[in-house]
Image (cartoon, rainbow, N blue to C red):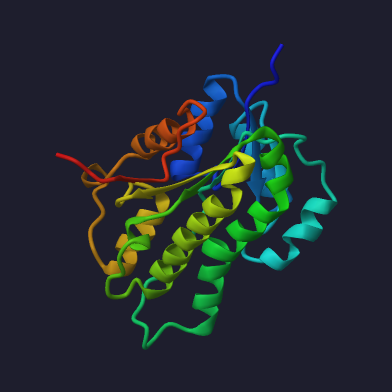
Amino acid sequence: MAAPTTHLITGAGSGIGAAVARRLLERGDGLWLLARDAGRARELRESFPGARTLVGDLADPERLSWALSHQELPDRLDSLQHIAGVVDLGPVGELTPKVWNTTLAVNLVAPAELTRLLLPQLRSSRGHVVFVNSGAGLRANADWGAYAAGKHGLKALADALRAEESGSGVRVTSVYPGRTATPMQVKVHRQEGKEYDPSSWLSPESVATTLLTALDLPPGAEITDLSVRPGA
């Protein structure tokens, strides 16, 4: 009997990550969910019965190796899905080093480090690394400098990883959603001083379907970059 397909997801607590986790759990896949602390891990296990958790703070990527070394890790991974992210808007002339460092740590450095730490499991299963990027990873607008810089870097990380790991059979996909109706979008609208109407934006479920389309592609084919935008 084949082992169940196993995934490790960051950002499963809400939005796109929660939608993806629900879909995978419903179809019987195994889930490992990364939480920033023990309390959050407990909440995730309650929300996704049967899922296992790991604790590691993406805002402190230099300690991820230490944190994971003290926990049981999955023996194999069919996918590693980087969905967590943070955003703080502001003009370059006003953004502080703290905002830059936090944004880049969570959105770029932590995904790179988590990938490095889990590459042995991904290589052995010829697994899949999925980076949930953003339209900001393809273009930068005013007040989005720090976020867009991290997402542009995330595209470079994915492209480099794909080139390096093609021989090991690891597939790498970047998904670029447009604005999505998530708690992050609520925060963005508040920072922009705009009224928030979730019906104007993509649903997390639509982005989850996009991600699963790339994930479920048969062996021998790879979706490298996939954009999805709100439609009529």
Expressed as whole percent of the image width and height from the top left, the position of residue 148 reads: 39, 68
Q: Position of residue 25 (x, y in %)?
A: 56, 25
Q: Is residue 24 left or right of residue 15?
A: right
Extreme residue in the bottom direction: 93
Q: Where is residue 98 shown, x and y percent of the image? A: 54, 79
Q: Residue furthest top?
A: 1
Q: Quadrant of the N terminus?
A: top right
Query: What's the residue at 53%, 27% (across, down)?
Result: 24
State the image coordinates of residue 89 (x, y, percent, origin top left): 37, 72
Q: Report the residue that reaches farthest toward the right.
A: 70
Q: Is residue 87 visible?
A: no
Whether residue 202 is visible, yes or no, is yes
Residue at (28% x, 68% y) in the render: 192
Instruction: Name the residue rendered at 26%, 54% in the picture.
Output: 196
Q: Which of the 4 image quadrants contains residue 33?
A: top right
Q: Nearer the viewer, residue 201 or 124?
A: 124
* Vertical position of residue 16 compared to residue 101: above or below: above
